[in-house]
Amino acid sequence: MVMMSDRGPRYSIYGESPEVSEATELHEIERVKADALEKLKKLGLKYPVRSRQEFLEAIRQDEPVYCYYRGRNISLKELAGYLRDEDFPLEGAAEAATLLAAACPIHAQSPEAAPANEY
């Protein structure tokens, strides 16, 4: 009789963990982008947004977005605070959502940054 180990595979030997693979990271970034876009459209911002300060002030009601890092959900306003001065002006909601998704600290090869499964 063959006994199976209760320990998971050692990914350093066998390859990447499916939880933190590059494909998973891209999927998560797309989810952040879609969620941010939806929330930005609901805010009814007037574009172009010329500065980070203007953008932060326009986000009146802060909401969490699908961006998990170290066991917590990062908010829309917090992601907006990560944008750089050279990211402005923002010409529309789609551009803003793309930059917000890029600001989400999801990193492949980093188990502590892997999002929690909600499935």
Image (cartoon, rainbow, N blue to C red):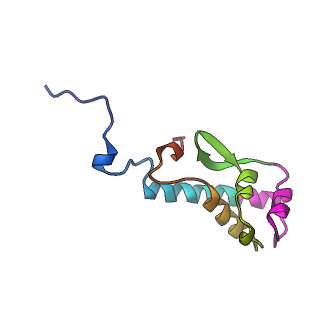
The percent position of residue 28, horizontal first and vertical second, equals: 54, 54
Magenta segment includes 87: no
Q: Which residue corresponds to the image point at 72% horizontal and 72% vertical from the top-left?
A: 86
| Residue nearest the observer in this picture, 112 or 47 | 112
Q: Which residue corresponds to the image point at 51% horizontal and 43% vertical from the top-left?
A: 112
Q: What is the magenta range? A: 38-61
Which quadrant would residue 91 be assigned to in this image? bottom right
The tally of labels here is 0
- Tell whether 27 sits left or right of 33: left
Magenta segment includes 41: yes
Q: Which residue corresponds to the image point at 75% horizontal and 59% vertical from the top-left?
A: 40
- Tell whether 16 sits left or right of 42: left
The percent position of residue 17, horizontal first and vertical second, equals: 38, 47
The percent position of residue 3, horizontal first and vertical second, equals: 20, 27
Which quadrant would residue 84 be assigned to in this image? bottom right
The percent position of residue 87, horizontal first and vertical second, equals: 71, 70
Q: Which residue corresponds to the image point at 59% horizontal and 45% vertical from the top-left?
A: 69
Up-down relation of residue 117 to residue 100 (above or below): above
- Give the quarter of the figure containing the N terminus: top left
Up-down relation of residue 45 to residue 7 (above or below): below
| Residue nearest the observer in this picture, 35 or 87 | 87
Q: Which residue lies furthest to the left in this view?
A: 1
- Tell whether 29 sits left or right of 51: left
